Amino acid sequence: MLGPERMKRIAQRVLAYSIAEQTEVLLFSEETYLTRFANSHIHQNVAERNVRVHVRAVLGKKVGVASGNDFSEFALDRVTEKAVEIALLQPENPDFHSLPSPKPIPAVNAFVQATAEFTPEQRAKAVAAICQLSKENGLVASGAFTTASSEIAVSNSLGVFAYAPSTVADLTTVIMSDDSSGYAGATSLDVREINAEQIGREAVDKALRSRNPHAIEPGEYTVILEEYAVAEMLSYLSYLGFSALAVQEGRSFMANKFGQRITGYNISIWDDGLDGSGLPMPFDFEGVPKQRVDLIADGVAKAVVYDSYTANKEGKESTGHALPAPNPYGPLPGHLFMKAGTDSKAQMLASVEQGLWVTRFHYVNPVHPLKTILTGMTRNGTFWIEHGEIKGATKNLRFTQNILEALSNVRMISAETKLRSGFYGGVRVPALCIERFSFTGVTEF
Amino acid sequence: MKEIAERALNAAQLQGATYADIRIVHQQTQSILVKNGHVEGLSHDENQGFGVRVIVNGAWGFASSSLLSLDEAARVAAQAAQIARASSLAKARDVYLGPSEVHVARYETPVQVDPFSIPLEEKIALLLAADEEMRRAKGIAVTESNMAFLRENKVFASSEGSYIEQILIESGAGIEATAVGANEMQTRSFPNSFGRQQKKAGYEFIRELNLVENGQRIAEEAVALLSAPQCPSGITTVILDSTQLALQIHESCGHPSELDRVFGEEASYAGTSFLTLDKLGSFRYGSPIVNIYADATIPSALGTFGYDDEGVPAQRSPIVKEGIFVGYLTSRETAAMLGQRSNGTMRADGWNRIPLIRMTNINLEPGTWELEDLLADTEDGIYMAVNKSWSIDDKRLNFQFGTQLAYEIKKGKLGQMLKNATYTGITPEFWRSCDAICNEKYWQIWGLPNCGKGEPAQVAHVAHGAAPARFRHVRVGIV
């Protein structure tokens, strides 16, 4: 860990050296450890220590970005010069107004010492516990256990300085037999909240129950989507349309829909980088404090997220959702939440006359972004439900589904939610029971 | 570099490593993005560091650092050894790498024009001109054009005595136009999707691309697609162009033939493979005209290099011969498990990542047909070109692709344009239904700079060569 003072000194050196009219310095420092296992033993075990510096130089309406991973004084000077040189060489961008000005940064505690100090031996013990559980049940375990600590600092010549340390721990496992598999996982700031044995038991239970899968015909079914599947679906929905840039360019499903109902009344989705039950981060990559943004409230399209560039275009304030520059994707929500309901997964199951239980999705991709049509496969635990009970495993199915339509057909929402890693942060979601979910193909396993 | 390498290898061996290797990597990238007539992104990145891979107590350990110093080399090597010792707490067997691979060599991508020597002004001017051409099309909403250049200097050294220096150079560029209508959005890109066409080549390749000349056509196609009829649903004959076929090969042949997947090492993330060991040498993967091979030696292809990241020389090896599955992509460790030698496909996407089995250039050999004759021979069907969406299950069997562009084929001729074309299938059924492949005149190699695999996530640069081919009884129009 470099700490706020050292990061501040590095940023100040760059700002002092730069001859640009405005300069931004974005600093990352990270230590990441990952233990990966397959065939019930560790086959990959890695450590990484890295630093990154990104310098954005602004001359009038010309913007250049240079970056590197060398914090020596010589390298810092060189990367600053390069950013200025790049800015000078390009034509003006009339849409660029200014880097953001300083605002108070809220306090967020996202750093857990126990996670930062977790050792390879501790990870190996957790992995060994899962492998042991698998072996006891005649199954094979695979998965990955990550522990990481990082620091981000953003500083600019208008007076912004923001610093935040954080940690994350993430353990996932797939347990397999020759004709079945089960998945489970957990994510937290605090590695002590990751219960390897519990995760192992959940995945083993799924692998045992999903043996002898039967094929069912493609078609529309009532589904119970576990939190793993919901998180994946929500991440893609967010990527497709919760960005101000996507709206400005007319390629978002939110465009021209603000104030209108686009999902069922029981659906509320928001982004909140300050909520400690997610993977919080108090500011974005421009050093702008994060605001809670209600994206869909009670089924109604409410808002999208902004960075300073897209906000300036509309005369608005950034909501604190910038990605590192240069960024052609526009702002993105990185701390998504979906409102919980009142039911348990057992109650959902009891309510389904005929349908499918889906643990997670695999290889999801958009088919038609504007219509929010996604496709993907089910994976690691797909079950047939009849008369409120799981009657056996099914072979995996391909879904091709309009996601807003699916969110209009949600009839039950779980009271419990689960935190998952998302594209740029965390996603906390409940499980959903959805009617008329469209499956368009099956596979052989 | 040599001193750092020696320090790390010595430190690893002092810590009990029976094998160690180090990769010291410096990457320089330049990327330019022009969007809607403005330069939206112009960046330069330098990234350096080293990764040490060791075997201690018969188990792997890997550690890496961005700080290039002798002391850090020793610290990281010791850390890798400590991690390996922890790995050995949950090992099934000792790692065996097979016979030694000892090479002292130097390789450099042959280029005519160093892309980093070309002034930024020239590159920007070309992209702005292409952008302007796209914006000539009435009704276009978003235009993007981009270039990307990479220079990677790599040193590989191993405790077996290898010392290999490589300089790999890449150049890529592409354009994309998006039209937006009422509840409809259509994108066309050139020359390929995934942002650009990219090769292991110099700036001469960018000049050959003719981005400006194709700008208006591409944008007009995007606008025309808005009002084109929807691709019909049903079972029909499909002819795929070489760009779409490249991704089909990638997903349904390249990935399943990776031997680490077959052994379950990617089970928790990318998945396993339907091409299990019992299928080697006997499984009918495709029709007798289907011949697929890996070749990391093809000049200027994106998956070309001198030596892989285990120091194994680049080579060509068959995967499918006359429709029969005959070979895997291997590493030293996985090849040894089959009693083979590695065919050199282990690559890492940087100093901070451990090498994995990655595709090189996986290619479908050309057939004998002229495209015109192939169309004339097709009574009824759909021609699909340039990928738009892709998805395949975790054993690489059930796939679904969408393409940017499609045309109906009626009585041997291309008919009207169709939008939102999709097709789906099961891998071996699909490849067995291939009954015609165009000849080498139509064969092109397409770079894919976004192949994802592994945890922590790694992105590989790979390529696929193909000529248009015909497939029978394919399900299309799935929405």
Image (cartoon, coloured by chain):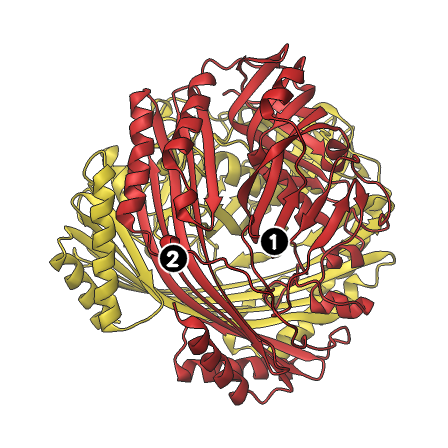
Chain colours: A red, B yellow
Mark 1 or 2: the one toward you: 2
Q: Quadrant of residue B125?
A: bottom right
CA gap between label 1 and label 2 equals 23 Å
**Tag 1 and tag 2, C-beta contact below 8 Å:** no
Total numbered circles = 2
Please say if A299 is above or below A384.
below
- Camera-side residue of B266 and B175: B266
* B132 to the left or right of A150: right
Identify which amino acid the numbered label 2 is placed on. Gln
Label 2 residue SS: helix
Position of the C terminus of chain B, as image quadrant, is top right
Residue A423 visible in image? no
Identify which amino acid the numbered label 1 is placed on. Gly
- Camera-side residue of A29 and A328: A29
* B374 to the left or right of B306: right
Q: Residue at x 66, y 52 (%)?
A: A271
Image disc number at residue A119: none
Position of the N terminus of chain B, as image quadrant, is bottom left
Q: Residue at x 66, y 34 (%)?
A: B239
What residue does disc 1 label? Answer: A334
What residue does disc 2 label? Answer: A113
Q: Quadrant of residue A116?
A: bottom left
Dot placed on the residue nearer the N-terminal end, 1 or 2: 2
Give the letter of the chain under mark 2. Answer: A
Label 1 Cα neighbours within 10 Å, binned few <14 / some 14-19 / many ≥20: many
Label 1 residue SS: loop
Residue A182 pos. (x, y %): 45, 26
Give the letter of the chain under mark 1. Answer: A
